Image (spheres, helix red, strand yellow):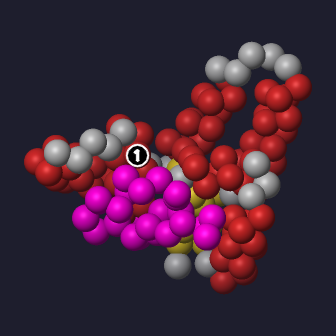
Amino acid sequence: MTYLLDTTAVSDLMKEHKRVEENLANAGRVDRVVICTIVRGEILFGIAKLPPGKRRSNLEVKAEQILAAVYCEPVPQTAADQYARIKSDCQTKGIPLDENDLWIAATAIAIGATVVSRDSDYRAVQGLSVTDWTH
């Protein structure tokens, strides 16, 4: 099985959330765990907008470690097809979904991955498998 960590999952790892760390360690033994370029960008942007200081420096170190340890899956061309379908479906149903979350969901479906997230908005995406490692 392939797991795609979304931004909340990477953030939880940066905060050293024990359950997320345990689930990552267990999954990594037999499954493939990845992030995607969208998640990488969100993490780096979140850190970049922080003021210089100890907190930012600590987060930069943690992010560098995690981003070096977890493969970054490129967004495949077929994710565009999934994006169009998901966005159209969400708009028809009146479900607001952040643009980056749409791309993360589309990438996960395109590569056959389960999204790891505590963001409940993903549950509205038809055909997307989602799990929360914080429980």
Q: Position of residue 43 (x, y in %)?
A: 62, 38
- Whether residue 113 is visible: no
Which percent across, then down, holds residue 125? 29, 59
Give the side of residue 17 with respect to residue 39, left or right. right
Q: Give the residue displayed 81% in from the left and 44% down from the top.
A: 62
Which stretch did the figure color magenta? 111-135
State the residue lying farthest toward the left: 92
Tell which of 27 and 92 is nearer to you. Answer: 92
Image spot of residue 130 (x, y percent): 44, 67
State yes or no: residue 123 in magenta.
yes
Residue 81 at x, y percent in the picture? 24, 52
Q: Residue furthest bottom?
A: 30
Q: Amino acid at mark 1?
A: Asp
The magenta stretch spans residue 133: yes
Residue labelled with disc 1: 101
Question: Going by the image, does 127 lie left or right of 74?
Answer: left
Position of the C terminus, as image quadrant, is bottom right
Q: Residue at x 74, y 16 (%)?
A: 51
**Is residue 133 visible to the viewer in this orientation of the structure?**
yes
Specify few, some or many for label 1: CA neighbours under 10 Å numbering under 14, 14-19, or 20 or more: some
